[in-house]
Image: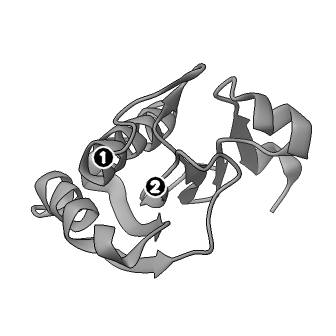
Amino acid sequence: MTSDAVRRVQSGNPWEETIGFARAVAAGDRVLVAGTTAFRGEVLHGEGDPYEQAKAAFANALEAIGEFGLGIESVIRTRLHLAHARDVDAAGRAHKELFDSVRPVTTVLVVEGFVDSRVLVSVELEAFRGAVDS
């Protein structure tokens, strides 16, 4: 695969510059979306509410695959990272509402925490672009 076959998208999140990563990368027939939270600029949407944070984080991640002309129907894998096991039902409910018709493979993990302690949920996506012209 040549470097021309890889395209990267930034979201403007300051951590992308600090750490040196892209929000989403398309490589071949896959688009991968990095860990995404419910932040929009400086505002954390759904603060204190794992359901609302999951919905907002997935909206941000879906916006990233939208940069490649993809929508929810292209999602083949999701990952939910939760700060607390108690939030599995709430975050899972948000996931089901969004992805029930798509049914991607999904992993749910409880993590030690996030850089910002107000973050309860971080999500990742992988999408399939189908046949990609070289």
Q: Residue 119: image x %, image y %? A: 52, 48
Front position in the image: 17 or 76: 17
User: Residue at (88%, 45%) from the top-left corner?
Assistant: 19
Indicate the secondary structure of the residue bearing disc 2. Answer: loop
Q: Which residue is mark 1?
A: 49
Q: CA distance from mark 1 to mark 2?
A: 8 Å
User: Residue at (53%, 45%) from the top-left corner?
Assistant: 118
Residue 102 visible here = no
Numbered badge on residue 87: none
Residue 52 figure quarter: top left
Q: Residue 20: image x %, image y %? A: 89, 43
Decide if residue 86 is on the left or right side of residue 113.
left
Decide if residue 28 is on the left or right side of residue 74.
right
Q: Residue 33: image x %, image y %? A: 57, 52
Front position in the image: 47 or 93: 47
Dot 1 and dot 2 residues touching (CB under 8 Å): yes
The amino acid marked with disc number 2 is Leu
Decide if residue 113 is on the left or right side of residue 86.
right
Residue 109 visible here = yes
Which quarter of the rendering shows the N terminus? bottom right
Q: Residue 80: image x %, image y %? A: 43, 67
Residue 57 figure quarter: top left
User: Residue at (79%, 37%) from the top-left corner?
Assistant: 16
Q: Give above or below for 10 relative to 92.
A: above
Q: Which residue is mark 2?
A: 120
Q: Give above or below for 6 relative to 82.
A: above
Indicate the secondary structure of the residue bearing disc 1. Answer: loop
The amino acid marked with disc number 1 is Asp
Within 10 angstroms of label 2, few (less than 14), some, or many (20 or more) residues? many
Front position in the image: 81 or 5: 81
Q: Which callout, 1 or 2, points at the residue further toward the start of the chain?
A: 1
